[in-house]
Image (cartoon, coloured by chain):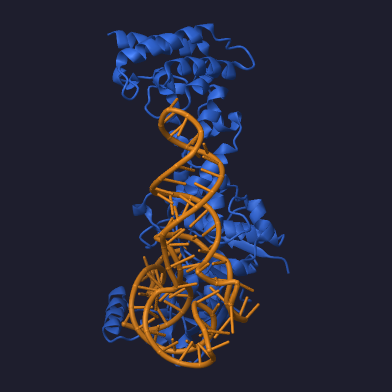
Chain colours: A blue, B orange
Amino acid sequence: MSVKVRLAPSPTGFLHVGTAQSGLYNWLFARKHSGKFYLRIEDTDRERSTKEYEQNIVESLTWLGLTWDGEITRSSSNQPRYQALLGKLLSEGKAFYCHHTQEELEAERKSQEAEKLPPRHVCGHKHSEKGREAGGIVRLAVDEASDRIISFDDELRGRVEFKQALLGDFSIGRSAADALYHFAVVVDDADMEITHVLRGEDHISNTPKQILIYEALGFPVPKFAHLPLLLAPDRSKLSKRHGATAVLDFKKDYLPEALVNFLGILGYTFNSELLTKEDMAKEFDLAKVHKSSAVFDIQKLNWLNSQYIKKLSSAEFKRVAELPHIPDAAVPIIIERLEKLSDTRDFAYLWEKPDYDAGLLKWKKADLSAAASALAAVRKILDAWQAEDADAEILLRNTLDSAATELGDRGLVYWPFRVALTGKEKSPDPVQVACAIGKGAALERVDAAIEKLRT
RNA sequence: GGCCCUGUCGUCUAGCCCGGUCUAGGACAUUAGAUUCUCAUUCUAAGAACACGGGUUCGAAUCCCGUCGGGGCUGCCA
């Protein structure tokens, strides 16, 4: 039987990086086994689901390159099916109507907690006339006296067991026509013939309930694998208050390949730490996915991102940085020191005149007049520079070096020159910058610096 | 509170199943050094962990028991 997996996010918020990681592992698993990876929008909560969020999910996955097979499906379009099956369970006595109010249920829960009893609603309407009267919510009839252990063999955690008696008669429909999450996912997964349910660890305790639904419906139970969660640095669940958590929040700074790489190695140890999702798919083994949650370490993401940025061609870089007009010669200078794409603007001096205080031109213990005479010497050299020559960079460096040797201190020449070109205390080698911006611009900037010192 | 998952450097982890080769390896981060006008890159080096307590054993990160910590679920959310 061929593998069929799915990602089933609910469109009630922006696509979270944790969901994206889950999507990646589903994608890898499908890829590895030549199976199918589907995208299903779980919009059973019509109050909170929006088209905008659905669009965001699609955009996020597309950006990451996690393409799905076939058309997107939606729970909302499966409503008639839920209604029919809910009706079937109701008529078979496997489900019933619960007429308790939310206040009553809440009071029950509170007293159970106070008495250190397991929290569950064993509904008094289950076997009574009331349970057959339409109205109220629909619950699955679960035998609370059973000593059955509901178990499943998690593909990464091994056998997980729950006592059925602790479950209570849990809800499966807001009404006979309106399915709740547990019921909807089970029906959807069964209808789509999903073979492996790969989802977050937060669903482990939902699994026994869903198994009971599969059984009540007479559907085959798929295999389950519960993936570890992503944590914030304080080890709590990663959420908005920890900064960026929506996939598209990362778009302005990170390459999708880097994010995918990061998400991949965060829950799995591959042979290499730097690899594409295609590489990952080759060696992916579901049983080797880590069991414990990992902290989302932005430092490692930054490092990975810098590695991917270094591999970019000039054209690619200009496109992803959204700066199509910067000179090609500037790109290698930027790429070598970039961690986040949006930091490219720190290198604006490569295409714009810098602005700085004249005092910055002063080299260590030397004074400003030393800077002025050094710049005058540099100006002369620059003026005579054969910038069109194939060896222009070496040529300039050599003449500058000999001037520096004469003065006995390289910094005396290079420091003011670099400041004149970049206007910054920390910046790349001035010879490289001069080559990137061209002889004319370099001369202009040196002249501007000389002028600054004069006033 | 109840149930479930989980616990090796600051972080991600290798090793654990099949005890000795582990004075616990790698990566990111940090610190120091080399190159160097500054930054960055690159290279070299250093510090840094088996949650705790029992037990089994000649020997335990590895096996057993307990404790503690972290997380999830406990919804007419998903």
Q: Is residue A451 visible?
A: yes
Q: Residue A131: horizontal and vertical position, in percent?
A: 42, 83
Q: As displayed, is residue A89 above or below residue A28? A: below
**How many numbered marks does the figure carry?**
0
Q: Residue at x 53, y 20 (%)?
A: A436
Q: Position of residue B76 (x, y in %)?
A: 38, 69
Q: Is residue A38 above or below residue A210?
A: above
Res. A179 in view: no
The residue lying at 51 percent from left, 20 percent from top is: A431
Quarter of the image where the N terminus of chain A is located: bottom right
Q: Which quadrant holds residue A316?
A: top right
Q: Is residue A80 left or right of residue B69?
A: right
- The foreground one among A431 and A116 is A431
- Quadrant, the C terminus of chain A: top left
- Residue A437 in the image: state x and y as whole percent: 51, 17
A361 or A265: nearer the viewer: A361
| Residue A12 x, y percent position in the rendering | 43, 55
> Left or right: where does residue A315 sit relative to residue A446?
right
Reply above or below: A301 against A330: below
Q: Nearer the viewer, residue A166 or A264?
A: A264
